[in-house]
Amino acid sequence: MSKIKPKLLKGFRDLMPDEAIIKERFLKTIKKEFEKYGFSPIYTPALEYLNILTGKGGDENEKLMYKFKDNGNRDVGLRYDLTVPLARFVSLHKNDLNMPFKRYHIAPVWRAENPQKGRFREFYQCDCDIVGSNSPLSDSEIIFLIHDTLKALNIDDFQIRINSRVFVDELFKALNLDNDRSKELAILMDKKDKMSNEKFQEKYSEILDNNQKEIFEHYIYGINDFNDMENFVLKYSHSEESKKNIEHFKKVLEITESVKSHIKYDPNIIRGLDYYTGIVFETILKESPQYGAIFSGGRYDGLVGMFSNEDIPAVGASIGISRLISALEERGFFKNTGSTVSDIIIMNMSQNLEPEYIKIAHKLRTEGINTDIYYENAKMKKQFKFAQKMGYKIAIIMGEDEKNKNVVKVKDLDKFEEIECSLEDAIDNAKKILNK
Amino acid sequence: MSKIKPKLLKGFRDLMPDEAIIKERFLKTIKKEFEKYGFSPIYTPALEYLNILTGKGGDENEKLMYKFKDNGNRDVGLRYDLTVPLARFVSLHKNDLNMPFKRYHIAPVWRAENPQKGRFREFYQCDCDIVGSNSPLSDSEIIFLIHDTLKALNIDDFQIRINSRVFVDELFKALNLDNDRSKELAILMDKKDKMSNEKFQEKYSEILDNNQKEIFEHYIYGINDFNDMENFVLKYSHSEESKKNIEHFKKVLEITESVKSHIKYDPNIIRGLDYYTGIVFETILKESPQYGAIFSGGRYDGLVGMFSNEDIPAVGASIGISRLISALEERGFFKNTGSTVSDIIIMNMSQNLEPEYIKIAHKLRTEGINTDIYYENAKMKKQFKFAQKMGYKIAIIMGEDEKNKNVVKVKDLDKFEEIECSLEDAIDNAKKILNK
């Protein structure tokens, strides 16, 4: 039979055990924090009707979707993100959901992008959202969640940059621009960090007249904190709506007072042309800015309305998993993860003793210590080489001699020291070596 | 803007929070057991080249695959199981893997089957496999793993029915049938439990002559334990290979002696026409046989060779997740899981007190207690109705009065009793109610 060449599709990857162990440990920490805040898991299918996935609009997105006709000739696609499926989920099940509805969802999404270093066509998203509340308290909870999650990952140099889309709208109202120009300007603002200041000024000067430039420059260069923004808004608008927006945002700042050292007000945070309608935030690592925004999101009160006659407010955030894992790896958060989840290997000294090895393994496993047994009665050299490559911390050795004396050897594979002791003591000794 | 109708594809489903919480709790238990045995996680892509997925052959499988041409005009498909991707993974990475390689993989697979009650087109598989060992010890470890995993799920009435495909081959050799008739007979044996005994006898009588019938009936009706099988094999074969196979199986029984009350030797376990080459097992619940096999697998030494010049032995098992979860639900394993992961809700008595609520929530969350805050200052009736629907166990109440007295009320929502106490005491009281 001719062999099939094993290969992966372009832009797709496997995770080897060492990488998958890190990912699992990361997700475990994240889930624990999400659940502390009362976010519950849900599952939605990887495949959905194409018109649901593309509903949000944007030809750009549709171009990148994995789409096809299924066996029943339906137009289907692999999900592109987890937010549109959430909106579909809420619309479909709204009679069975209690509002506010807090869910997290950690799952792969697919985009047929040109693969680049660190960018794949299949990648995980990790979202938490509160649907059904527009209170400042719900905005604030997302900020606290970002704060606590990063602290749980031993990160302290993070800065949550916040703004609200309503203030960007105030700017556009003050500029009195038509829709096309507003869009053009918004795109430009969103790309500001990716160009030189000269280039930026050249670009907005093409769009704005002198009066408008003055207003725009006040917004871009003259606002250093939320007080400045309040003055800006109240200078150009006297509407009740504007005052309410100011009050809402002030309330968020008041509630999140205890973590304010991690918050920076930044009028330039816009989060693209997407569906955001209120608060928006991007979290960066001050000591590793090269990873970009690692935990971002905002309020999007219009999205569920795409599928529903009823508009349901929502606010949420999403972790950039691979970026954050890379940053954590660099910082040594995942030290001591080898190619195996096991701490201990029981060496195979004699086939006759295999039932004994099973008993020893059983005792260790019952104590919660992940344990392997070497399955073949191979040469010791081979077994130790394997143990070293895999990264076990301890080898347990019992040959006929030890069996007759009713002892085992516990070998610390880092220090290469061994102790001979009873099986009971061996478990205690192993725990000491492992600090358990 | 016209609304998009929210709907799911036929055969696909969402998991609501109550269902997803159960699934997460289940997977957590499973993963812990798998890791105790030293199985490490891996990830493989959902999409693979179609010729890799169909490699195992079987037009039947290919018909049920979700397959399409991607944007690069490649023939691709959504994975149909986790075993073929494992074989591809091992072949592709064999220079970077230490053997034996023990991995678990929990992930969705897709099959365009006609949906039936409890059968979906997207479902999770949960596999653990040992690749690179053909020792009886590795077969035995899988049996112990099944044993321990089910015990960890509080199941005790399980029976692991074991056999080996080599003994089925011995039967075919003894019958001296051609390939087509062997295949026909194997299909019949595999379907034995799904037909009456009369029908079964009628069917095999069509395939076999009288001499063959005698041998076949000896196998089917005359073998009650492994001793009988040994006698059967040695009656018809004197090859060294047959003796080695007997010894291998005896060794497995010897090693697994301590769990023998859960093992039954059953010559009728065949596991279909798939890729199995050695030991095979199916686990059933004696008190709930209607769920069928809930944890099955076996040895398949030829699969990796599909992609490799080198044959690499492998043995593994797979949990029937949805069946097992249904059985566990029936048995009350998931009692006390409501629509939320949170145990406590902090009621919203006044917007002015929201920063206080955040502080109380923070204290509880730091103690590891999942906690929600009611985000809107709604009427008490509405808040209590929400609390009841969601299934919180405790409500924490602090209005202006309590704030002035520096106390909170801790309300047990099951007993509908409340205590007024300091915040510090409230945390202790909450823990008492939650048994934490």
Image: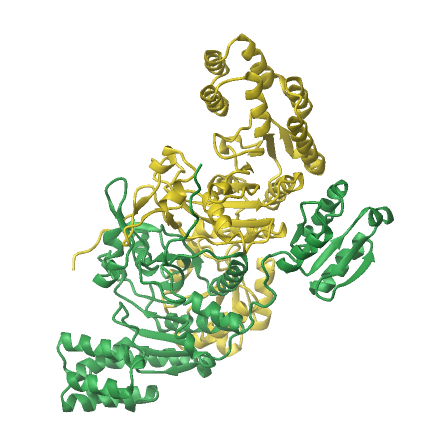
Chain colours: A yellow, B green
**Left or right: A349 in relation to A304:** left
Residue in the picture at 63% in, 56% down: B342
- Figure check: A337 above or below A318: below
**Left or right: A302 in relation to A228:** left
Quadrant location of the C terminus of chain A in the rendered image:
bottom right
How many marks are shown on the rendered structure? 0
- Figure check: A111 above or below A347: above
Question: What residue occupies the far right of the structure in this picture?
Answer: B405
- Dividing the picture into quadrants, the one containing residue A151 is top right
**Left or right: B357 in relation to A17:** right
Residue in the picture at 49% in, 76% down: A403
- x then y, percent, for residue B263: 42, 81
Residue B299 in sight here: yes
- x then y, percent, for residue A360: 51, 72
Residue B58 in sight here: no
Question: What residue occupies the far top of the structure in this picture?
Answer: A210
Quadrant location of the N terminus of chain A in the rendered image:
bottom left
- Dividing the picture into quadrants, the one containing residue B193 is bottom left
- x then y, percent, for residue B56: 24, 61
- x then y, percent, for residue A217: 57, 14
Viewer-nearest residue: B408 or B429: B408
Residue in the picture at 86% in, 46% down: B404
Viewer-nearest residue: B166 or B423: B423
- Dividing the picture into quadrants, the one containing residue A11 is top left
